[in-house]
Image (cartoon, rainbow, N blue to C red):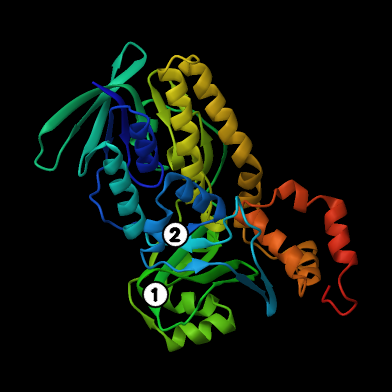
Amino acid sequence: MYDAIIVGARCAGSPLAMLLARKGYRVLLVDKASFPSDIISGHLIWQPGVAHLKGWGILEKVRQSGAPPLVGITLDVDGLALRGFVPPFEAMSEAFCIRRIVLDKILVDSAAGAGAEVRERFIVREVCSNGDRVTGIRGQITNGTKVAETARIVIGADGPHSVVARLVKAREYAARTSLSWTYQSYFSGLGLTSTRLFLRDYRFGGAQPTNDGLTMVFCMGPHDQFHAFRSNVEGNFFKSLDPWLAERVHAGKREERFTGMADVLNFFRKPFGPGWALVGDAGYDRDPITAQGISDAFRDAELLADAIDAGFSGRRPLDAELRDYEEQRNAAAREMYDMTCQLASLGRIPAETRQLLAALQGNEADTGSFFGTIAGTVPISEFFQPSNLRRIIDGAPPNAER
């Protein structure tokens, strides 16, 4: 019998397995994929996520992976360029755009190195239960052999379409429909050294250096325009880029096919019940426009590991710890969730948004704080309080575009 079975071995499951194994628990980590393997992702680890990597002792592996550190952002809004630096988080000033084929392998290996048992190509078919309490899983390995395992707790870390969440009938709340679509690919020869973003009516996108000298270029639009966009993905993709980026992309070389998605839901799920818990996108999913997925997964893996440890060690009832885990997750995520859903609507840029962005031009400090609200290093309510916005707008030079 295991102390914990974790279903899903990517950005939430592997860190959770690693942390629990380091605390001395017997952990089984399973995934239907094998590693290394790729998935569509924004790849970005903001500074709070980087701080977790440092605390876990695996940041150097990310540094050595070939993903360059990113320390500056340029946002082009209809030709108006904002430049700034995200304020640090726990002394971390750099972000990383790392391929998932690289990052997930680092995380899985770290879990195995901590003592977790890892089984790849394991498909979960059922959860076992004793009355209303989950007691384990049933599944099958590649050759079709059926396997059953038991544990004190079964954790779903298997993404927004979580099998575990479906089988335990985890309740959703604060849910919203899909708001945007995204397409991305990888280009060589762009020569970028920092993050470049653009915002237009009905479009958002950008480019970020990643592994192997490549640049990940992406484009997003409102969900109701998805079918029109994918009727000519390549042509519409290039037409959507801002002129500065389009020039460099045309001069470069696309190295991989375009990949896209339009089924990202926005929800919170009840992340625990008798004998089970959820973590990462299985318990809380949001539109990718603010690129919070990886950093949120790291945060919640650590919160859940601490809760399980406190419950299993007898310091406090496990149910009480898991209730606190849900409250802490929601408190940390709710402001960003609301802002993410607002940004992901991707309609016409509101006049007040244009006024603020125009006032930020040339104001590197406040532009950095604005970027910090997206990165999670500056409280959203602090930056967007009316008195602060008025200070920025009133302090803009007279010739600032309004």
Question: Which residue matches tag 2?
Answer: 43
Question: Which residue matches tag 1?
Answer: 214
Q: Quadrant of residue 141 in the image?
A: top left
Q: Quadrant of the C terminus?
A: bottom right
Q: Quadrant of the N terminus?
A: top left
Residue depicted at x 59% and y 35%: 330
Position of residue 211 in the picture relative to residue 82 (left or right): left
Name the kind of residue labelled 1 in the image: Leu
Q: Quadrant of residue 158 in the image?
A: top left
Q: Secondary structure at mark 2?
A: loop
- Can the viewer see residue 264 in this picture? no
Residue 123 image point, x, y percent: 22, 38
Determine crowd level at label 1: few under 14, some 14-19, many 20+ residues with C-alpha closer than 10 A: many
Q: CA distance from mark 2 to mark 1?
A: 13 Å
Residue 327 image point, x, y percent: 59, 29
Q: Nearer the viewer, residue 366 or 187?
A: 366
